[in-house]
Image (spheres, coloured by chain):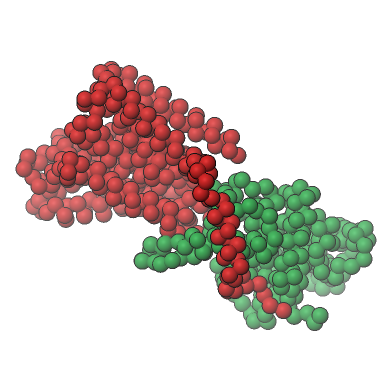
């Protein structure tokens, strides 16, 4: 497979006061690829993803989507470009049903008169039902309130929602962090399913075995710099040892690039 | 390799059949399931409580309770507190509170009476519609102020509306120097609060209209869904692209405007704009909302619920008067009902989780 980059982040820098959160980081995500993003706390993974999703504006650097330079100033810009974020806490509204959550902020409207927008609830339910059917998410009814769902089901709804609107790129922040072992398996299946359907995914995780299971490639950050970027291969023990040595600073593939 | 495009793909016939099959399975027509559905209807408890109360008071005083004149008394009560409670409902669903509505009824009633009877300074008395429009605009500006303070300045709604609670009451007394502004007894404006159509008070008809519009807004429009979403998880609503601040400001404006409507109606009903009207009405309105199943934590509540809440209070007060129960004891009993309603609702919610 020839790799076509869908997202290219070049020389991204971000400082918070005197703290250099990102020191000229480059990241490429290819079409149809699952990219694992690993690093210790404060390594810069979340900051980098917040730059991509529009929550932070970088101090320097470029972002290219399909080789076109883009300007992302806020989360709406990012969404318009087809980038969706799945938040670690799911960002679901518990007192609304599954269908309402999938379409929250993007409800299907039957007719509108000035500020009055009448919702097309039936269409939303049918489409939400077909969405969870396609992704093989096990939920009895899209009319169930989210508060009635298990943690794994909630994560599945959060991921399903991110994929429902022409998403080209899905960023997942620790999608397996708060789940039981059985639920983790289902979420990983869902990520594979999305990949088969053609999505490009960036997955932040501290669970190296999950990265190993589903990712094609892994990037390791340390102290705001990229220290490793290579395809996932070999067996899990070897993979884990290699990643850990990058995370703790024993190895560094990009040390010659340090300019400061 | 294509990107994922669920939305742009037409929904296949299979999906549609699948979805309809699922929904029909859920609502099959056998009567047990129908019964189960009725029992799931969230306002069922308040409805039953309301009906039992009506039966009880009818049994206790069969010749008075159902008389049109008595029903009109109840309807006027329900209209007053139902309208205030609907406004309160919008704010409470988003997780806020509006303590200013009682004082706002006094202030707006006084202003509307002043405009119609005396005019301001050198400006002579204004026409009825113009006076009403001016006072509604003023009230919505107060709501805008509340919404702005809560969303942009992050001031707790309890505090900012408590400020208005004091200021509006004080201003109403200051404008009138403490004396009511009295309408001529044949002033046409008085029809609004005193008139009846087919023995139904006009103010109750106004409540029904406002209730239908509010219920439609909350259940069927995107705005309504966003109001519930904000009460459920404001951060999730924000990242989902809901204009959180705009929606919350809308709710505070709705509350102030409905308080103003009640102020206008009460001025008409009493034949005067008086600065002492509506004392503690905000608490009655909140009580009606809570008895009707509204959660003060936000995210839960319905128009039909708050009207039933107001109706329960109205029927109880009316019934207790008919039964000659001491008015001191009436408050004790209403307090007990309120507490029971809240405890019951909390237990039910905890069990369902």
Q: Nearer the viewer, residue A95 or A249?
A: A95
In this image, B170 relative to A242: left or right?
left
Image position, residue A217 (x, y; %): 82, 69
Indicate the quadrant where residue B2 lies: bottom right
Give left or right: position of B57 versus B227. left
Question: Residue at 50% across / 30% down in the picture?
Answer: B344
Q: Is residue A238 visible?
A: yes
Residue B132: percent from left, percent from top: 19, 52
Please provide percent x and percent y for residue B100. Answer: 34, 40
- Residue B294, compared with residue B115, is above or below; it is above
The green one among the chains is A
Name the residue nearer the viewer: B311 or B100: B311
The image quadrant where one finds the C terminus of chain A is: bottom right
Query: Which chain is drawn using red?
Result: B
Q: Quadrant of the N terminus of chain A?
A: bottom right
Residue drawn at 64 percent across, 48 percent down: A149
- In this rendering, does residue A127 appear at all? no
Residue at 38 percent of width and 40 percent of height: B306
Horizontal and vertical percent position of residue B163:
36, 40
Q: Could you say which is closer to the camera, residue A252 or residue A211?
A: A211
In the figure, is residue B132 to the left or right of A179? left
Quadrant of residue A8 in the image?
A: bottom right
């Amino acid at each position: 497979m020839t790799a076509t980059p869908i997202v290219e982040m070049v020389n991204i820098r971000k400082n918070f006061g005197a703290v250099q959160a990102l020191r000229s980081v480059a990241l490429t995500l290819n079409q149809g690829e699952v990219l694992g993003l690993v690093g210790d706390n404060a390594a810069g993974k979340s900051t980098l993803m917040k730059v991509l999703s529009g929550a932070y504006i970088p101090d320097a650097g470029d972002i290219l989507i399909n080789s076109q330079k883009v300007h992302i100033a806020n989360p709406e810009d990012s969404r318009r470009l087809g980038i969706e974020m799945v938040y670690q806490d799911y960002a679901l509204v518990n007192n609304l049903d599954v269908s309402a959550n999938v379409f929250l902020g993007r409800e299907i409207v039957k007719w509108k008169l000035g500020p009055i927008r009448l919702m097309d609830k039936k269409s939303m339910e049918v489409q939400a039902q077909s969405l969870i059917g396609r992704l093989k998410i096990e939920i009895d009814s899209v009319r169930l309130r989210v508060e009635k769902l298990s943690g794994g089901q909630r994560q599945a709804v959060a991921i399903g929602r991110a994929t429902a609107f022409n998403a080209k790129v899905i960023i997942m922040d620790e999608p397996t962090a708060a789940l039981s072992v059985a639920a983790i398996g289902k979420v990983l299946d869902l990520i594979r399913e999305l990949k088969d359907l053609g999505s490009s995914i960036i997955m932040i995780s501290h669970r190296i075995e999950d990265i190993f299971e589903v990712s094609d490639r892994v990037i390791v950050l340390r102290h705001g710099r990229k220290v490793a970027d290579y395809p996932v291969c070999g067996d899990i023990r070897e993979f884990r040892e290699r990643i850990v040595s990058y995370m703790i600073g024993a190895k560094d593939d990009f040390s010659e690039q340090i300019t400061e | 390799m294509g990107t994922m495009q669920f939305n742009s793909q037409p929904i296949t016939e299979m999906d549609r059949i699948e979805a309809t099959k699922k929904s029909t399975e859920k609502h099959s027509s056998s009567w047990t399931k129908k019964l189960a559905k009725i029992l799931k209807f969230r306002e069922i408890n308040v409805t039953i409580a309301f009906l039992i109360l009506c039966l009880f008071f009818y049994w206790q005083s069969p010749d008075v309770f159902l008389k049109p004149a008595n029903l009109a008394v109840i309807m006027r009560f329900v209209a007053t507190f139902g309208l205030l409670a609907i406004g309160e409902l919008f704010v409470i669903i988003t997780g806020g509170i509006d303590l200013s509505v009682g004082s706002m009824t006094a202030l707006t009633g006084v202003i509307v009476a002043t405009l119609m009877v005396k005019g301001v300074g050198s400006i002579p008395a204004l026409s009825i519609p113009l006076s009403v429009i001016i006072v509604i605009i003023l009230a919505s500006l107060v709501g805008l102020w509340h919404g702005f303070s809560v969303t942009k300045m992050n001031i707790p709604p309890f505090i900012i509306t408590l400020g208005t609670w004091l200021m509006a009451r004080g201003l109403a007394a200051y404008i009138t120097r403490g004396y009511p502004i009295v309408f001529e007894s044949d002033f046409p404006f008085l029809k609004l609060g005193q008139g009846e159509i087919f023995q139904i008070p006009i103010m109750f008809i106004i409540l029904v209209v406002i209730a239908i519009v509010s219920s439609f807004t909350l259940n069927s429009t995107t705005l309504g869904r966003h109001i519930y979403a904000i009460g459920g998880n404001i951060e999730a609503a924000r990242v989902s692209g809901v204009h959180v601040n705009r929606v919350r400001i809308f709710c505070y404006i709705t509350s102030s405007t409905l308080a103003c409507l009640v102020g206008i109606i009460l001025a008409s009903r009493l034949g005067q704009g008086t600065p002492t009207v509506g004392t503690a009405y905000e608490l009655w309105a909140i009580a009606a909302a809570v008895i009707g199943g509204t959660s003060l934590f936000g995210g839960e509540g319905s128009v039909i619920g708050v009207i039933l809440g107001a109706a329960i209070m109205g029927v109880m007060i009316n019934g207790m008067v008919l039964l000659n129960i001491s008015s001191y004891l009436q408050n004790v009993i209403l307090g007990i009902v309120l507490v029971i309603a809240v405890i019951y609702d909390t237990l039910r919610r905890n069990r369902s989780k």
